[in-house]
Image (tube, grey):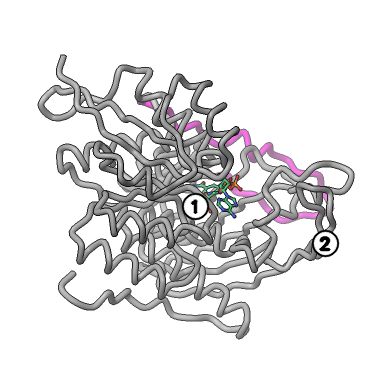
Amino acid sequence: MNERRVGIVMNGVTGRMGLRQHLERSIVAIREQGGLPAADGTMIIPEPILVGRNELKLRRIAEQHGLTRWTTDLSEALAEPDVEIYFDSSLTQLREKGVRAAVEAGKAIYCEKPIAESLDAAIDLARLVRDAGLKNGIVQDKLSLPGLRKLKRLVDGGFFGRILSVRGDFGYWVFEGDWQEAQRPSWNYKLEEGGGIILDMFCHWRYVLDQTFGQVKSVYCQGATHIPTRVDEQGNEYAATADDSAYGIFELEGGIIAQMNSSWATRVFRDELVEFHVDGTEGSAVAGLRNCRAQHRSATPKPVWNPDLPATEKFRDQWATVPDNEVFDNGFKVQWEMFLRHVVDDAPFTWDFVEAAKGVQLAELGLQSWREGRKLEVPALDLGGHL
Ligand SMILES: NC(=O)c1ccc[n+]([C@@H]2O[C@H](COP(=O)([O-])OP(=O)(O)OC[C@H]3O[C@@H](n4cnc5c(N)ncnc54)[C@H](O)[C@@H]3O)[C@@H](O)[C@H]2O)c1
């Protein structure tokens, strides 16, 4: 069988997302399944070159996965003749620099979110790749989650009638690092290192809301830093300068009201770490990462408010499980496969740097809304030129 080897510079593979989701569950998984069939039947085989700061870690990761190529020098990696794609899952703060180097080298570029720390920088990168004619993509993994895929199926099938509202709850307790180690890197809690839950999560909420229910038209956001002091990976106490919780209200096209709670300072009393409750005139649904339950108008109970009596019904039991009806692969891998086909076969890939900039735009407006204590419109993005 014919093979098409595609060199991919993977920057940031020693990190949580880079290692687990992008290298192990996506690129190594595609290699282990024998590659990815291209349109003409040729097998696309990704050939990663691991890039990071720590030689020892890189060598260990490479050896664990039967890989031979790694370096601490990004420009050396980008100069390898077989490299077609630059991938970046390094620190948010470092992304812009890496992407600019890849543009210079003329590579297709695929990135973790957020694409940059500011909207100006995000738009600049979108313009750069457009003007250089380079293929580009941003990770929008939540769209491929089984729970959200089933929810989208309900939306597309007209299950809800007119959608009224969406209530999203995301979060869990991230340990402060004193008596139990924190389960997220400390940079997330430092504004000066690109941290903050608004910049992190509003990128996700933008594409989830836009692409599942309707374009986001306005935002009101109240942020908070509930835990002001944390302890880092070296055991040193530091001031948590970034927001660790955000309470957002969004107006979507069609008059839909969405509320999203995002918090690293909440204890989970839900079935999954993120849940979306959608109410419509014809039915409602609750979707998590994997599961989705629905209740049709015809099966809706009629509770009567009476605080003097205990609840007479088990409300959770009245919801029907939405069946899978298909096999769901890892969401990161699904998007990698789409991006590889985009590069090799010119197959469509809609989640480009303009979509990436929209996420940063919502985060920036959320931060501004919090600062100014007011609701802000979300204007259409203007890249200028011929886009
Ligand atoms: N799509 C998602 O659901 C999702 C989830 C979490 C994080 N992310 C994004 O992925 C990116 C990485 O997040 P993470 O949680 O994996 O972080 P991480 O801290 O685990 O990894 C960051 C990577 O950057 C490297 N790095 C750190 N400091 C550096 C420096 N000074 N110079 C060079 N390299 C340095 C680290 O070695 C590591 O490889 C972030 O931009 C984050 O927003 C996305």
Q: Is residue 154 visible?
A: no
Q: Nearer the viewer, residue 72 or 199?
A: 72
Residue at the (60%, 48%) spot, across then down: 302
Residue at the (42%, 56%) spot, across then down: 98
Q: Nearer the viewer, mark 1 or mark 2?
A: 2
Residue 83 in the magenta stretch? The answer is: no
* Nearest to N terminus: mark 1 or mark 2: 2
- In the image, residue 320 lies at what x, y percent? 51, 33
Q: Is residue 278 visible?
A: yes
Q: Is residue 218 left or right of residue 178?
A: left
Three-letter code, disc 2 = Thr
Q: Magenta stretch: give its range.
A: 297-326
Q: Nearer the viewer, residue 47 or 130?
A: 47
The residue positioned farthest toward the top in the image shown: 1
Residue at the (16%, 14%) spot, across then down: 1
Residue at the (65%, 56%) spot, across then down: 188
The residue positioned farthest toward the left in the image shown: 40
Three-letter code, disc 1 = Val
- In the image, residue 343 lies at what x, y percent? 21, 42
Residue 225 lies, with reference to residue 344, above or below; the image says: below
- In the image, residue 181 lies at what x, y percent? 80, 42
| Mark 1 nearby-residue class (10 Å; few <14, some 14–19, many ≥20) | many
Residue 229, numbered circle: 2
Q: Quadrant of the C terminus?
A: bottom left
Q: Quadrant of residue 238?
A: bottom right
| Mark 2 nearby-residue class (10 Å; few <14, some 14–19, many ≥20) | some
- In the image, residue 306 lies at what x, y percent? 76, 54
| Element carrying mark 2 | strand
Task: Tell me which secondary structure the magenta stretch mostly adopts.
Answer: loop
Q: Nearer the viewer, residue 150 or 120?
A: 120
Residue bearing the label numbered 1: 278
